[in-house]
Image (spheres, rainbow, N blue to C red):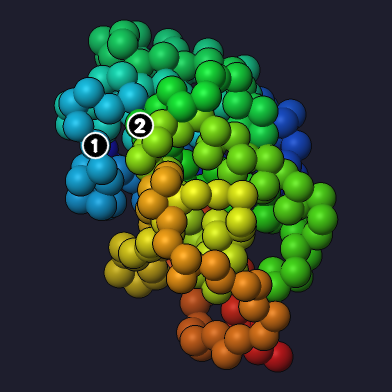
């Protein structure tokens, strides 16, 4: 798999358009594939230690990514993919069938209201999907209440459908000083660890293990922080990735 797609995608005029379901339906009508935050080959080594051939996996916001095929070819075949866009779901189903990945299940569903039983997945994974919720969040140190309501609804749903000792993996632009206080909310029992991948720019991979939280992970929200300075032009990020990047230079001004 590579990072290319047949026709370049023109980003919407405003980032808030990413919150509009009709934008995605229209986009997926024209776009065959697109990989947010790099394709599976770039972070495969970080995912595989958390999987076995018998793992049941849920992918949030599959869009037209090829991540599920990568997981399948690596031996994990019990995969369910969801997306809010009916067009994305139909296209994904057709593509998987044409490539003989008939065991991968794809369904239309909202990650804010996961339609699954309690404790039914060994691993839940998302790549850039939760970042969409933050595109219109306002101050990253203190996101809007409506943003936090959606984020917490998603995380509560993920926590509910994970089996005990199950793993949630979030691949994101979200930096630890913003995301760890959210992941460490008191209603969650998971431990929180993270690592990075990438060369010019680092992407974050959070690994949350349900039922393994320790007392020293009760992290309070941070209101001010000296963020590491870096200068990054949009062109250094692939495709539209810059749309989800928090401008840390502005935070220090």
**Secondary structure at numbered mark 1:** loop
The reply to whether callout 1 and callout 2 are in contact (CB within 8 Å) is yes
The tag on residue 103 is: none
Residue at the right extreme of this rendering = 145
The quadrant holding residue 86 is: top right
Q: Nearer the viewer, residue 172 or 232?
A: 172
Q: Nearer the viewer, residue 94 or 45?
A: 45
The residue depicted at 38 percent of the width and 68 percent of the height is 202
Q: Which is nearer the N-term, disc 1 or disc 2?
A: 1
The quadrant holding residue 168 is: top left
As drawn, 202 above or below 60: below
Q: Nearer the viewer, residue 227 or 154?
A: 154
Residue on which disc 2 sits: 122
The residue depicted at 74 percent of the width and 29 percent of the height is 22
Q: Residue 173: percent from the left, percent from the top?
A: 50, 61
Residue on which disc 1 sits: 51
Q: Nearer the viewer, residue 200 or 44?
A: 44
The residue depicted at 70 percent of the width and 91 percent of the height is 253
Residue 13 shows up from this direction: no
């Amino acid at each position: 798999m590579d990072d290319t797609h047949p026709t370049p995608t023109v980003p919407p005029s405003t980032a808030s358009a990413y919150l509009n379901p009709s934008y995605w339906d229209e986009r997926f009508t024209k776009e065959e594939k697109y990989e947010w935050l790099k394709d599976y080959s770039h972070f495969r080594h970080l995912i595989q230690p958390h999987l076995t051939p018998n793992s049941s996996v849920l992918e949030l916001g599959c869009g037209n990514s090829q991540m599920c095929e990568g997981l399948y070819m690596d031996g994990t075949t019990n995969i369910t993919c969801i997306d809010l866009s009916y067009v994305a779901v139909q296209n994904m189903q057709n593509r998987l069938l044409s490539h003989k990945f008939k065991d991968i299940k794809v369904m239309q569903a909202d990650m804010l209201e996961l339609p699954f039983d309690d404790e039914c997945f060994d691993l839940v994974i998302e790549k850039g999907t939760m970042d969409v919720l933050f595109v219109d969040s306002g101050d990253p140190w203190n996101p809007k209440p409506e943003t936090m309501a959606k984020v917490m609804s998603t995380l509560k749903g993920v926590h509910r459908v994970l089996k005990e000792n199950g793993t949630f993996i979030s691949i994101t632009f979200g930096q630890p000083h913003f995301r760890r206080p959210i992941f460490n909310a008191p209603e969650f029992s998971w431990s929180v660890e993270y690592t990075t991948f990438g060369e010019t720019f680092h992407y974050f991979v959070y690994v949350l293990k349900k039922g393994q939280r320790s007392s020293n992970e009760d992290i309070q929200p941070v209101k001010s922080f000296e963020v590491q300075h870096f200068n990054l032009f949009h062109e250094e990020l692939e495709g539209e990735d810059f749309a989800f990047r928090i401008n840390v230079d502005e935070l220090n001004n």
